[in-house]
Image: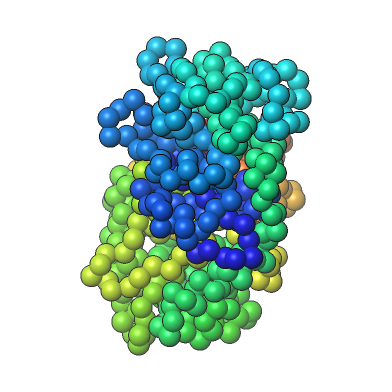
């Protein structure tokens, strides 16, 4: 949707796992941008958007492979500044007369250092020293640049790490300036925006206004049901949609029996006390647990929960006349790790239960107004919508709930132990004033029982892991560095207070290579 008050920057998606981070970096710089899969970018779309600049994203393919994605030629003819990133750089070189090689010595993964060469407005203020840290993730590299281009930076395996044609304002980098591991990546985006002369007037208030307009246009006079989980995402989605269409919205809170201790009551009370939105409390825990009991494969668990959610929503939707839409608080990290963004070409990591589309037979269309946002942006939008602060600051909780914190077979008994352990752990974190420092914390119960000794007796109980991570957006994360005192005090409390746990471990895996949840 072209909004005339804002200059638009078009991001052409070639399927990188981090394409949305480009959008996010640009929103941080108050630039309005839209992501479109490369297949959809044509004369019609660019005519509609009239972008003032275009970014070509990274992607998993190789331009040396026949049939791999290409940029529509119109992109190079518009006369607007271009920025190619990783695959975007390679495709740009390939199409403009340069060369890309794959094979030995062309790959680089992880941290690398780029050295400075020549000057340009594009790299102004970027090289603090002669070398700058970047994050590389490429199999191929550009081996010869297209006519008109010159080199501004190089690394051991990327001789053309930063290049540009300053006449046409086409720039390209082999690394990813959009990720946190390229610490000064923002400077390159700032320089690019300034070269493109883009107005930086985009705000969360503007996001809210445009989102409300889009919701009204999409929904018309139909009714919407919104799946409420009690987390910040679905709550923000519900309040936003309510602001757009008022009583055409009904919220359905599905208690799948996989919630944390006391959560169902808290959510219902908080919503009924603060909002005038019709709310159905659907206690379907029996249905979910009967179907999950004994299941151990992570994808089967996720898919079972997803399928049951669809069935349950269908049931409640049938009771609401004219219900045409199902609203969900799906965020971008859920989308990118499950299905390709807007039909783009990226790879599936986990099937998040709340994305992937609804079966056609359901007859409900999806309404996902937060689908392009990251967690912290949703929190900012929540503040914009005046949601209570304690709600906005809640740690994220996954849609499949405790099911994915119970690796191995799910049983009601293990879930009960897990609920108690989680409550003790979170209580400890709150008591030590750490809750808001940690992005997400939880306990997972392991599918192993271990031998212990308590009092003078032998125990043979479950082991659990504690997880606590810091993160900005859930895409990457580090473990939280608890003190030994905190850890031993918490372990003692868990073993003393939770029957069924006799061993406590702390997970110190970062993401990547791990994920935040265990399944
Ligand atoms: P992972 O484990 O993929 O988690 O590193 C990243 C963030 O997403 C949450 N998560 C989910 N949220 N539905 C959700 O709504 C899901 O299926 C799902 N799986 C993971 C996870 O808790 C973390 O905050």
Residue 116 position, x and y percent, is 68, 19
**Colour basis:** rainbow
Left or right of 61: which side holds 389?
Answer: right
Vertical comparison of 369 with 349: above or below: below
Q: From where the camera sits, is residue 162 visible?
A: yes
**Residue 54 point in image, percent of width and height:** 53, 45
Whole-percent x, y for residue 255 in the image? 43, 69
In which quarter of the view is residue 324 placed? bottom left
Q: Residue at x 60, y 80 (%)?
A: 275
Residue found 47% across the figure and 76% down from its top:
217
Residue 84 or residue 353, whichever sits in front? 84
Q: Where is residue 307 drawn, in percent x and y?
A: 30, 61
Considering depth in this image, is 197 or 33 the residue closer to the camera?
Answer: 197
Q: Is residue 186 visible?
A: no
Q: Is residue 180 above or below residue 207?
A: above
Please give left or right for residue 102 compared with residue 232 in the image. Answer: left
> For the point 54% across and 16% down, which residue is it?
159
> How many labels were placed on the picture?
0
Question: Which of the two residues, 270 or 350, is positioned nearer the viewer here?
Answer: 350
For this view, does 163 lie left or right of residue 59? Answer: right
Q: Residue at x 57, y 65 (%)?
A: 3
């Amino acid at each position: 949707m072209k909004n005339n008050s804002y200059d638009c920057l078009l991001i052409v998606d070639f399927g990188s796992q981090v394409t949305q981070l480009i959008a996010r970096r640009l929103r941080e710089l108050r630039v309005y941008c839209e992501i479109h899969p490369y297949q959809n970018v044509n004369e019609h779309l660019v005519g509609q958007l009239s972008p003032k600049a275009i970014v070509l994203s990274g992607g998993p393919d190789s331009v040396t492979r026949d049939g791999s994605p290409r940029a529509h030629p119109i992109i190079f003819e518009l006369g607007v500044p271009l920025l190619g990133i990783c695959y975007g750089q390679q495709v740009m070189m390939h199409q403009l007369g340069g060369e890309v090689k794959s094979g030995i010595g062309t790959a680089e993964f992880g941290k690398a250092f780029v050295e400075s060469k020549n000057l340009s407005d594009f790299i102004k203020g970027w090289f603090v020293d002669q070398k700058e840290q970047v994050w590389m993730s490429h199999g191929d590299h550009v081996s010869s640049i297209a006519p008109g281009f010159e080199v501004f930076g190089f690394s051991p395996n990327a001789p053309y790490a930063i290049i540009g044609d300053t006449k046409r304002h086409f720039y390209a980098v082999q690394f990813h300036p959009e990720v946190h591991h390229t610490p000064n990546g923002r400077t390159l985006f700032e320089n690019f925006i300034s070269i493109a002369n883009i107005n930086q007037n985009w705000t969360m208030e503007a996001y809210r206004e445009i989102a409300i307009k889009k919701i009204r246009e999409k929904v018309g006079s139909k009714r919407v049901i919104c799946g409420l989980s009690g987390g910040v995402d679905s709550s923000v989605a519900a309040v936003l949609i309510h602001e757009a269409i008022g009583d055409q919205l009904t919220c359905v809170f599905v208690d799948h029996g996989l919630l944390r201790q006391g959560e169902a009551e808290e959510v219902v009370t908080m919503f009924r006390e603060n909002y005038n939105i019709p709310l159905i409390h659907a206690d379907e825990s029996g249905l979910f647990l009967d179907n999950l009991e004994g299941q151990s494969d992570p994808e089967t668990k996720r898919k079972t929960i997803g399928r049951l959610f669809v069935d349950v929503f269908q049931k409640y939707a049938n009771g609401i006349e004219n219900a045409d839409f199902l609203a969900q608080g799906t965020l971008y990290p859920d989308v990118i790790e499950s299905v390709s963004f807007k039909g783009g070409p990226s790879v599936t990591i986990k099937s998040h239960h709340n994305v992937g589309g609804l079966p056609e037979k359901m007859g409900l269309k999806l309404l996902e107004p937060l689908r392009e946002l990251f967690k912290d942006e949703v929190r900012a939008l929540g503040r914009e919508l005046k949601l209570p602060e304690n709600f906005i600051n809640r740690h994220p909780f996954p849609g499949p709930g405790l099911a994915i914190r119970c690796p191995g077979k799910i049983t009601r008994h293990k879930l009960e132990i897990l609920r108690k352990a989680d409550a003790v752990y979170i209580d400890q974190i709150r008591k030590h004033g750490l809750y808001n420092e940690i992005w997400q914390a939880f306990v997972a119960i392991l599918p192993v029982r271990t031998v212990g000794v308590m009092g003078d007796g032998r125990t043979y109980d479950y082991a659990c892991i504690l997880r606590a991570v810091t993160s900005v957006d859930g895409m990457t994360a580090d473990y939280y560095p608890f003190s030994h005192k905190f850890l031993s005090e918490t372990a003692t409390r868990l073993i003393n207070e939770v029957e069924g746990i006799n061993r406590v471990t702390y997970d110190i895996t970062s993401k990547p290579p791990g994920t935040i949840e265990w399944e």
